[in-house]
Amino acid sequence: MKRINHQEAYSLDGACTNQAEEYFSRLRRAEIGIHHHIAGAYLLRYAQESSWREDNRRISNGDQVSRVAALAMKRGKIAMLPLYIEFIDTVWIPEHSERYLKTRDVAALPYLPKLLPSPGSARVVAPIKALPRFGKAS
Protein backbone atom coordinates (compact mmCIF):
# COMPACT_ATOMS: atom_id res chain seq x y z
CA MET A 1 0.00 0.00 0.00
CA LYS A 2 1.40 3.35 -0.98
CA ARG A 3 0.94 6.42 1.17
CA ILE A 4 0.94 10.02 0.09
CA ASN A 5 2.45 12.84 2.10
CA HIS A 6 0.40 15.82 0.92
CA GLN A 7 3.11 18.20 2.09
CA GLU A 8 5.31 16.77 -0.66
CA ALA A 9 2.87 15.85 -3.44
CA TYR A 10 -0.77 14.96 -4.19
CA SER A 11 0.17 12.16 -6.57
CA LEU A 12 3.40 10.22 -6.36
CA ASP A 13 4.58 7.22 -8.42
CA GLY A 14 1.03 6.48 -9.59
CA ALA A 15 -0.42 6.56 -6.07
CA CYS A 16 -3.33 8.91 -5.59
CA THR A 17 -5.87 9.36 -2.81
CA ASN A 18 -8.47 11.26 -4.81
CA GLN A 19 -10.97 8.38 -5.00
CA ALA A 20 -10.76 7.66 -1.27
CA GLU A 21 -11.10 11.34 -0.43
CA GLU A 22 -14.06 11.67 -2.79
CA TYR A 23 -15.77 8.63 -1.23
CA PHE A 24 -15.36 9.92 2.32
CA SER A 25 -16.50 13.36 1.24
CA ARG A 26 -19.70 11.85 -0.19
CA LEU A 27 -20.16 9.78 2.98
CA ARG A 28 -19.89 12.92 5.15
CA ARG A 29 -22.34 14.80 2.90
CA ALA A 30 -24.75 11.85 3.07
CA GLU A 31 -24.65 12.04 6.85
CA ILE A 32 -25.57 15.71 6.74
CA GLY A 33 -28.06 15.65 3.87
CA ILE A 34 -29.67 12.19 3.87
CA HIS A 35 -29.24 10.39 7.18
CA HIS A 36 -28.76 13.33 9.62
CA HIS A 37 -27.08 10.92 12.05
CA ILE A 38 -24.98 7.82 11.57
CA ALA A 39 -25.01 5.46 14.53
CA GLY A 40 -21.72 3.69 15.12
CA ALA A 41 -23.38 0.28 15.36
CA TYR A 42 -24.67 0.67 11.80
CA LEU A 43 -21.65 2.37 10.27
CA LEU A 44 -20.93 -0.64 8.03
CA ARG A 45 -24.47 -0.48 6.57
CA TYR A 46 -24.19 3.25 5.90
CA ALA A 47 -20.78 2.72 4.28
CA GLN A 48 -22.18 -0.10 2.13
CA GLU A 49 -25.06 2.07 0.97
CA SER A 50 -22.69 4.94 0.23
CA SER A 51 -20.43 2.57 -1.67
CA TRP A 52 -23.40 1.34 -3.72
CA ARG A 53 -24.41 4.91 -4.49
CA GLU A 54 -20.83 5.71 -5.52
CA ASP A 55 -20.62 2.66 -7.79
CA ASN A 56 -24.01 3.33 -9.40
CA ARG A 57 -24.12 7.13 -9.57
CA ARG A 58 -23.76 7.22 -13.35
CA ILE A 59 -26.58 4.73 -13.95
CA SER A 60 -29.98 6.25 -14.70
CA ASN A 61 -32.59 6.30 -11.91
CA GLY A 62 -34.86 3.95 -13.87
CA ASP A 63 -32.11 1.36 -14.26
CA GLN A 64 -31.24 1.65 -10.57
CA VAL A 65 -34.86 1.05 -9.57
CA SER A 66 -35.06 -1.95 -11.91
CA ARG A 67 -31.90 -3.46 -10.43
CA VAL A 68 -33.01 -2.95 -6.83
CA ALA A 69 -36.47 -4.39 -7.62
CA ALA A 70 -34.89 -7.43 -9.28
CA LEU A 71 -32.70 -8.02 -6.22
CA ALA A 72 -35.71 -7.65 -3.91
CA MET A 73 -37.66 -10.20 -5.97
CA LYS A 74 -34.79 -12.68 -5.77
CA ARG A 75 -34.73 -12.24 -1.99
CA GLY A 76 -38.06 -13.99 -1.60
CA LYS A 77 -40.50 -13.90 1.29
CA ILE A 78 -39.56 -11.74 4.26
CA ALA A 79 -39.89 -14.01 7.27
CA MET A 80 -40.09 -11.22 9.84
CA LEU A 81 -42.86 -9.24 8.14
CA PRO A 82 -45.80 -11.09 9.77
CA LEU A 83 -44.16 -10.64 13.20
CA TYR A 84 -43.62 -6.95 12.49
CA ILE A 85 -47.28 -6.50 11.49
CA GLU A 86 -48.38 -8.32 14.64
CA PHE A 87 -46.14 -6.07 16.77
CA ILE A 88 -47.57 -2.93 15.15
CA ASP A 89 -51.15 -4.13 15.67
CA THR A 90 -50.82 -5.48 19.20
CA VAL A 91 -48.18 -3.26 20.80
CA TRP A 92 -47.26 -0.11 18.94
CA ILE A 93 -50.68 1.18 17.83
CA PRO A 94 -52.43 0.59 21.18
CA GLU A 95 -49.53 1.85 23.34
CA HIS A 96 -47.70 4.50 21.33
CA SER A 97 -49.76 5.79 18.42
CA GLU A 98 -51.72 8.46 20.31
CA ARG A 99 -48.57 10.10 21.71
CA TYR A 100 -46.87 9.86 18.30
CA LEU A 101 -49.82 11.45 16.47
CA LYS A 102 -50.16 14.24 19.05
CA THR A 103 -46.59 15.34 18.31
CA ARG A 104 -46.46 14.71 14.56
CA ASP A 105 -49.92 14.59 12.96
CA VAL A 106 -52.78 15.94 15.08
CA ALA A 107 -55.18 15.79 12.11
CA ALA A 108 -54.87 11.98 12.11
CA LEU A 109 -56.05 11.58 15.74
CA PRO A 110 -59.77 11.26 14.85
CA TYR A 111 -58.94 8.19 12.73
CA LEU A 112 -57.09 6.40 15.53
CA PRO A 113 -60.17 4.59 16.97
CA LYS A 114 -60.63 2.87 13.60
CA LEU A 115 -57.13 1.39 13.93
CA LEU A 116 -57.58 0.19 17.50
CA PRO A 117 -59.36 -3.14 18.04
CA SER A 118 -62.45 -3.05 20.18
CA PRO A 119 -62.01 -4.57 23.66
CA GLY A 120 -62.14 -8.35 23.62
CA SER A 121 -61.72 -8.70 19.87
CA ALA A 122 -58.58 -9.47 17.98
CA ARG A 123 -57.78 -7.58 14.82
CA VAL A 124 -57.52 -9.95 11.90
CA VAL A 125 -54.50 -9.40 9.68
CA ALA A 126 -54.95 -10.56 6.12
CA PRO A 127 -52.34 -13.12 5.02
CA ILE A 128 -49.56 -11.80 2.85
CA LYS A 129 -49.65 -13.17 -0.66
CA ALA A 130 -46.39 -14.10 -2.33
CA LEU A 131 -45.16 -11.56 -4.84
CA PRO A 132 -44.87 -12.76 -8.44
CA ARG A 133 -41.36 -13.58 -9.61
CA PHE A 134 -40.02 -11.85 -12.67
CA GLY A 135 -37.52 -13.18 -15.16
CA LYS A 136 -37.08 -16.68 -16.49
CA ALA A 137 -39.77 -19.20 -15.71
CA SER A 138 -38.51 -21.97 -13.50
Image (tube, rainbow, N blue to C red):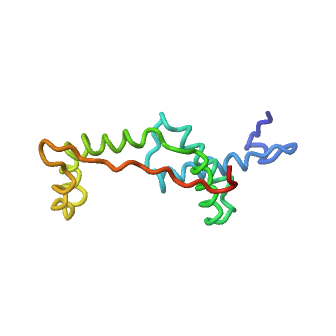
Viewer-proximal residue among 100 and 36:
100
Q: Left or right: where does residue 109 sit relative to residue 57?
A: left
Residue 98: x, y in percent? 18, 51
Residue pictured at 87% horizontal, 43% vertical: 13
Viewer-proximal residue among 83 and 28:
83
Depicted 26 relative to depicted 62: above or below: above
Residue 41: x, y in percent? 48, 33
Residue pictured at 58% horizontal, 43% vertical: 47
Depicted 1 relative to depicted 99: above or below: above
Residue pictured at 65% horizontal, 49% vertical: 23
Extreme residue in the front direction: 138
Viewer-proximal residue among 17 and 12:
17
Residue pictured at 67% horizontal, 56% vertical: 135
Q: Left or right: where does residue 97 sit relative to residue 87?
A: left
Q: Left or right: where does residue 123 sit relative to residue 22?
A: left
Residue 15: x, y in percent? 82, 43
Q: Left or right: where does residue 105 sit relative to residue 7?
A: left
Quadrant assignment for the N terminus: top right
Residue 27: x, y in percent? 57, 49
Extreme residue in the right direction: 13
Extreme residue in the left direction: 119
Number of numbered discs overlaid on the protein picture:
0
